[in-house]
Amino acid sequence: MVAETPVTASASNARVQTEPTPPFVEVQDLSIHYGGKKILSGVSFDIYENEIFGIIGPANSGKTSFLRALNRMDMFTPGMNVTGTIKIDGHDIQRWKNVYALRRRIGVVFPLPVGLPLSVYDNVALAPRLAGIKRRSELDIIVERCLTRAALWEEVKDRLDSLGSLLSGGQQQRLTIARALSQDPDLLLLDEFSIAVDPVTTMRIEDVLKELKHEITIVLVTNLVQQTRRLSDRTAFLLSGELVEVGETAELFEGKVRDQRTLGYLEGRFG
Ligand SMILES: Nc1ncnc2c1ncn2[C@@H]1O[C@H](COP(=O)(O)OP(=O)(O)OP(=O)(O)O)[C@@H](O)[C@H]1O
Ligand SMILES: [Mg+2]
């Protein structure tokens, strides 16, 4: 039997007060290769719970590849090789035995809406059904909740049975977000979600994300530096597979950068 170390009430209280919140995602020395070509070079940073973490950088800097590694898409991408460690909620995702269980905890939104050839309702109900939820009343609640969280419910509540692909582009992208939320993920990955969305809808989705971050952690990859300025608590700048720096977004935009390349990119001097 292991001897117990007595912990006084005051000592344990002190620990509660001083212990910093552990990061929700820990990226340590992460490199990504396709074939023999290195496209991400030993990057390390942390992402905290309930923050919007922005990732910016010019084309080919490795942003989408990083999201793929986070979502274990490397398992399904021929030639993609990931080294280093990613921990989510303290667990090394490379060692996670059930990769499907991991991926259920992560919602992903791609640049263009990926509409399934299904009704609006079934687009959102699909994953919960696959997870074993069969009762219509339960599915109704999930579908309404996800569409509401994606700011789409009011617009589609009378046409839940029509094809998702008949919605406008901006509505389809919000439908994609509703679907990404349908399994109650802890982490939402967005890859240039507004590339095909008009400015008004972009602002609506941005408002949705600001609300969602109170419940989930969001990684926002964007080519638009003003979008990371509006949304992200902290921002990482990737350049040709190198992590140039990570900082508080407000500070970076005040010019408090460690590397002048960051300032150059934020000011639109390249990229
Ligand atoms: N499946 C793949 N096989 C081989 N090379 C790939 C693959 N996917 C991406 N790459 C290469 O990896 C590099 C980084 O691509 P990635 O998509 O991660 O960049 P990105 O920063 O998201 O760029 P963009 O802003 O254009 O979306 C590119 O040179 C790309 O051609
Ligand atoms: Mg990309």
Image (spheres, rainbow, N blue to C red):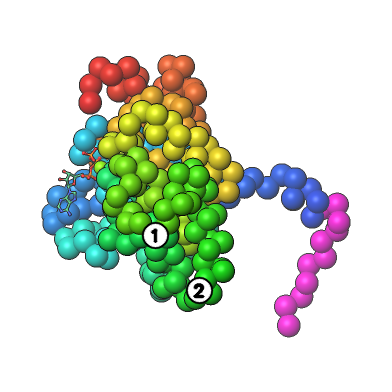
x and y percent of residue 245 in the render?
38, 32
246 relative to 165 in the view: left or right: right
Quarter of the image where one finds residue 191: top left
The residue at which mark 1 appears reads as 161
Tell me which corner region of the image, top left, top right, bottom left or bottom right, holds residue 220.
top left
Question: The N terminus lies in which quarter of the figure?
Answer: bottom right
User: 105 and 164: which one is in front?
Assistant: 164
The magenta-colored residue range is 1-11
**Picture coordinates of residue 251 (x, y %)?**
49, 22
Q: Is residue 194 above or below residue 256?
A: below
Residue 75 found in image quarter: bottom left
Is the residue 152 above or below the residue 161 in the image? above
At 21% from the left and 35% from the top, the residue drawn is 59
Q: What residue is shown at x 86% (from left), y 52% (from top)?
A: 10
Q: Nearer the viewer, residue 133 or 12?
A: 133
59 left or right, relative to 154: left
Using a 10 Å C-alpha cutoff, classify the residue at mark 1 as few (fewer than 14 neighbours), some (14 to 19) or many (20 or more): few
Is residue 211 highlighted in magenta? no
Q: Which residue is pictured at 50% across the width and 45% down the height? A: 154
Looking at numbered disc 2 in the image, what kind of residue is underneath it?
Ile
Find the residue positioned furthest to the left: 36
Give amino acid for label 1.
Asp
Secondary structure of the residue carrying numbered label 2: loop
Q: Label 2 belongs to which residue? A: 133
Per the image, label 1 sits on a secondary structure element best described as: loop
Q: Is mark 1 within 8 Å of ligand 2?
A: no
Q: Position of residue 201 (x, y in %)?
A: 39, 34
| Tag shown at residue 58 | none
